[in-house]
Image (cartoon, rainbow, N blue to C red):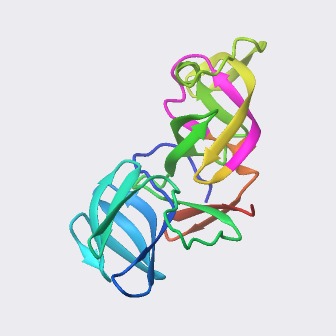
Amino acid sequence: MPLQSAAALLALSLVLATPYAGAEQSAVEVEALLGNTAVLLINGQRRTLRVGEASDGVTLVATEPALATVEIDGNRQTLGLSRRVSTTYEAREEQVVTIARDAAMQYQTRATINGRGALVLVDTGANMMAISSDKARALGIDYDVSAPSIVETAAGRTVAHAVTLQSVIVGEIEVRNVPAMIIDGAFPSTILLGMSYLKHVKLQEHNGILSLSRSP
């Protein structure tokens, strides 16, 4: 099933290793955020918790669009997208980002484009990343230097500029020199994460979770 764009659900993949009082290390991975609910991987076991609920000694304290706060034995940690907090952390063989599917069967996550944060929609049907000129200006992308061309969009024919993005980062996976199209106007309303980025990662979809992975 092709992945398409649109949605209102943020997801993140991050790892926290925090010691229980006087005991072993406890590994917590936040796989996805869905409103006030988080999907946690606690010592290898998947748990779905609402804010205030606890499992295996881990309490979900709060969620925000791109943050989760957990408490382990009285120790709170607020975690951002793919942030790792641990003095005993060992690098993974693969860089992995997980994104939860929304009710419309679509995927959405945060990205950093040329050093600035933005919301993106995964779209394997788009040959290149597509950014509206409104959002391009907000991201500081200088697209007027490239020659304009005419493209077909859902709203009809419009002007577009081909650019090369210096860097696109999703989670910990960075791709440099990513081709993109800047489309005149406000369409698409959310940046499309197309194949000019996605061809550099491995995509796997299982039980409503999309994984993007790449060997470092």
Residue 37 figure quarter: bottom left
> Left or right: where does residue 185 sit relative to residue 182?
left
Magenta residues (range): 174-192
Of residue 107 and residue 52, the one placed in the foreground of this image is 52
Of residue 107 and residue 53, the one placed in the foreground of this image is 53
Q: Please provide percent x and percent y for residue 114.
A: 64, 32
Q: Residue at x 57, y 71 (%)?
A: 89
Count of marks, rendered view: 0
- The image quadrant where one finds the C terminus is bottom right
Q: Please provide percent x and percent y for residue 68.
A: 36, 57
Q: Residue at x 39, y 88 (%)?
A: 23
Outermost residue, front side: 22
- The image quadrant where one finds the N terminus is bottom right
> Left or right: where does residue 178 sit relative to residue 58?
right
Outermost residue, bottom side: 23
Q: Residue at x 64, y 22 (%)?
A: 141
By secondary structure, the bulk of the magenta-drawn segment is best described as strand
Of residue 70 and residue 122, the one placed in the foreground of this image is 70
Q: Please provide percent x and percent y for residue 27.
A: 47, 77
**Is 131 covered by the magenta stretch?**
no
58 up-or-down from 123: above or below? below
**Is 176 covered by the magenta stretch?**
yes
60 up-or-down from 58: above or below? above
Q: Residue at x 51, y 52 (%)?
A: 107
Q: Please provide percent x and percent y for residue 191.
A: 56, 35
> Left or right: where does residue 145 sit relative to residue 155?
right
